Amino acid sequence: MTTPDIRVEKGHAEPEEVAALTAILLARAAAQPDAPARRGRDKAGWRRLERTPGFRAPHSWQG
């Protein structure tokens, strides 16, 4: 006997339900085009503290 690729963690699924779920997942995977790998940002999205201006307004969320 082989081990199944999909396992039900809680409850009991009939073989027909597992087959339907597998068919849906395979159809969704086949429908998505092959997307090229994403490149990361060229520069960091945060700022270094020593490069920030010395004054922040009292109502600033950053202070």
Image: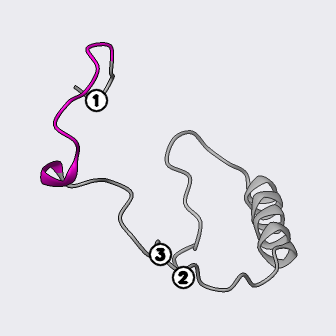
Q: Between tags 2 and 3, which lies in front?
A: 3
Q: Is residue 57 above or below residue 5?
A: above
Q: Are marks 1 and 3 in contact (CB under 8 Å)?
A: no
Residue 43 placement, left or right of 27: left
Label 3 sits on what residue type? Gly
In the rendered image, the quadrant that contains the C terminus is top left
Magenta-colored stretch includes residue 8? no
Q: Which residue is mark 1?
A: 62
Magenta residue span:
49-59
Q: Are marks 2 and 3 in contact (CB under 8 Å)?
A: no
Q: Earlier in the sequence, mark 1 or mark 3?
A: 3
Residue at image location 51% in from the left, 41% down from the top:
10
**Most foreground residue, 21 or 17:** 21
Q: Earlier in the sequence, mark 2 or mark 1?
A: 2
Label 2 sits on what residue type? Thr
Give coordinates of residue 62: x percent, y percent: 28, 29
Q: Between tags 2 and 1, which lies in front?
A: 1
Q: Is residue 21 above or below residue 5?
A: above
- Element type at mark 2: loop
The residues bearing labels 2 and 1 have C-alpha atoms spaced at a distance of 56 Å
- Element type at mark 1: loop
Q: Which residue is mark 2?
A: 2
**Most foreground residue, 52 or 48:** 52
Residue at image location 59% in from the left, 65% down from the top:
6
Mark 3 surroundings within 10 Å by alpha-carbon count, few (fewer than 14), some (14 through 19), many (20 or more): few
Give coordinates of residue 20: x percent, y percent: 83, 59
Mark 1 surroundings within 10 Å by alpha-carbon count, few (fewer than 14), some (14 through 19), many (20 or more): few
Q: Which residue is mark 3?
A: 40
Label 1 sits on what residue type? Gln
> Extreme top residue here?
59
